[in-house]
Image (cartoon, rainbow, N blue to C red):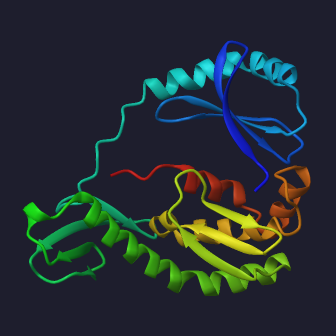
Amino acid sequence: MGKSVRMATLASIPVELERKPIKNIYLRVVPPTGTVHMSAPKRATIEELSRFVAKHTAWIEERQAKIAATPLPSARRFLSGECVYLWGVPLELVVKFGRGCNIVLRDGSRLILSLKTQEAASSPAEREALLNEWYRRELVRAVPPLLARAETIVGKSAAEWRIKNMKTKWGTCNIRARRIWLNLQLAKYPPICLEYIIIHELTHLWERYHNAHFKSLMDRFCPDWRERKKLVDTPLED
């Protein structure tokens, strides 16, 4: 879709360089490895990009040090006793084997995950996949009324919306097709986070870039969007 990614050394720092049809240069330091990712205009020269990195070297090193000092989360096994979330509410996961294949929410505090296989034959990936399908069904029920309300607020409508399990983005908007993608993991967060992301993506139908105009529109459509953004950007505690 008009972008390319390659590794480059800029101001003596290895950078994952992504060319996009944008006006400004953006830097991110990506956990857990501390990789430096740069989104840059297609016409920006290597000299311009190197100067930009050199100007932000202290910030890059500070972010990388912070990431290096952060303990890596333990691998999830999706077994009984672990904590999972639904719409911001922590639930105790209870896994039963040899009981059929389904998920049931019980007492508003426990999530019963049943599998046909025995424990020794079941993998964490299998249990996670079943849980993710349950999250997908929850989103399918939750999105339509929130989307209808958001479309009224924003004054733009999506031609379609889809769900995808994304690692780095909460949502995306294909402006030409008026298609919105929503992250599967949003089902773990309070509904106001899902509503915020929907409004955010619809707002891109007015303004492509995250510039001052975009933020002014968000201030109008969702006055507390900054608080909601902080909420959805805060990792949930296991």
Q: Is residue 106 visible?
A: no
**Residue at the (39%, 69%) spot, across then down:** 132
Residue 211 coordinates in the image, percent (x, y): 87, 49
Q: In this view, does 72 lie to the left or right of 101?
A: right
User: Along the line of sight, which residue is nearer the eye, 140 or 154?
Assistant: 140
User: Which residue is at a point 59% across and 65% down the rendered structure image?
Assistant: 193
Can the viewer see residue 25 in this picture? Answer: yes
Count of marks, rendered view = 0
- Toward the viewer: 62 or 223? 62
Q: In this view, does 57 lie above or below 23?
A: above
Where is the N terminus found, in terms of image quarters? bottom right
Q: Position of residue 129 (x, y in %)?
A: 34, 67
Q: Residue placed at 26% from the left, 66% from the top? A: 127
Placement of 60 over or under 37, stated as above or below: above
In x, y percent, where is residue 65? 51, 20
- Image point 56% across, 56% down: which residue? 232
Residue 149 as seen in the image, left or right of residue 208: left
